[in-house]
Image (cartoon, rainbow, N blue to C red):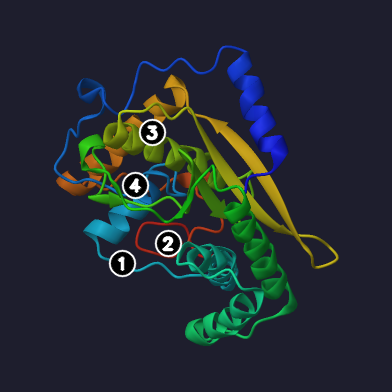
Amino acid sequence: MLPRRVWDFIRSLGAEGGVFAEIRGWRFDYVSPRYRYRPSPSEVAGICPVHRDVFLRRVMRIKPKRSKEAVYGAIVHEFFLEPFRLVDRGVSDLEALSRAMWRLGKRLGVRIDGFLQRVYTVGAGLALQSIIDADIPVRVEPQIPGAAVGLSDIVRPDLLVGFLPVEVTTASSSTRYGEGKELQLAGYALALEAWTGLPVDYGVALYIRRRDSGEPWLEWRVVVIDDGLRRRFLRARDEVAMIVDNSVDPGPAGENCPPWCPFRGAPGCPPAEA
């Protein structure tokens, strides 16, 4: 279901020598947990550069405020993935997939606008393509053991194409969200390696955009999961775990605090933007 250009790019990287990584999920001397708390990949890759979002959520028990944009982004995410879930359960009839879209809207309590319909259609097309490309299996939100690499008991990438973890987002790749998706993919790669004993050198971040015409545009970005990215992930994992284990307030991020952070306005954080 991945575009041909994505596979061609990955093959070209392999032809150049591939990825050398000393830090693998099965190298427990590198990846074993150092603290009792085992964060999820999304916590490790949170939008706060000092991980104060995890402190506020896990230690202070403060619930974040979600903007309309964040809520809509989560809905877009669901409309893209739902066809994959249905095809994974054996649904391959176009009419059945179409009916399921309206059931999804009712379940989420949202009015299905034109963009959501188009996103669902794109997802359905890719999901059905995965049936044709049956030699490369596609799993939706597979449950992968994460404890061996210091993560939560189960970690779930949005998609697993062969052994390529894929993360789907509506955020911009040029923001900290883009960096966070790279870290998430590194976490999934380490968990997969610990579980299967097979190397995972690449991941894919899929950014869903809206064109001026209202049509969805998919940006596929291949992430090379080398030692540098793996070390960054493990450092962030340990920082998050230490914060929760020891109830350490890392303090606000100051000028680096993202203006869209849902914890703006929380105690010690900058005020929410008007």
Q: Of the residues under marks 3 and 2, which one precedes in the sequence?
A: 3
Observer-side mark, 1 or 4, equals: 1
Name the residue type under label 2.
Answer: Phe
Q: Name the spot of residue 164 as percent of width and height, x first.
A: 49, 39
Q: Position of residue 272 (x, y in %)?
A: 51, 65
The residue identified by callout 2 is: 263
Upstream in the sequence, badge 1 or badge 2?
1
- Alpha carbon distance from label 4 to label 2: 13 Å
Measure the alpha-carbon separation of dots 3 and 2: 23 Å
Give the residue at mark 3.
233
Instruction: Confirm whether residue 103 shows in the render.
Output: yes
Residue tagged 1 = 62
Q: Which residue is mark 4?
A: 251
Marker count (numbered): 4
- Is 108 in front, or is 127? 127
Label 4 – label 3 distance at C-alpha: 21 Å
- For marks 1 and 3, the one nearer the N-term is 1
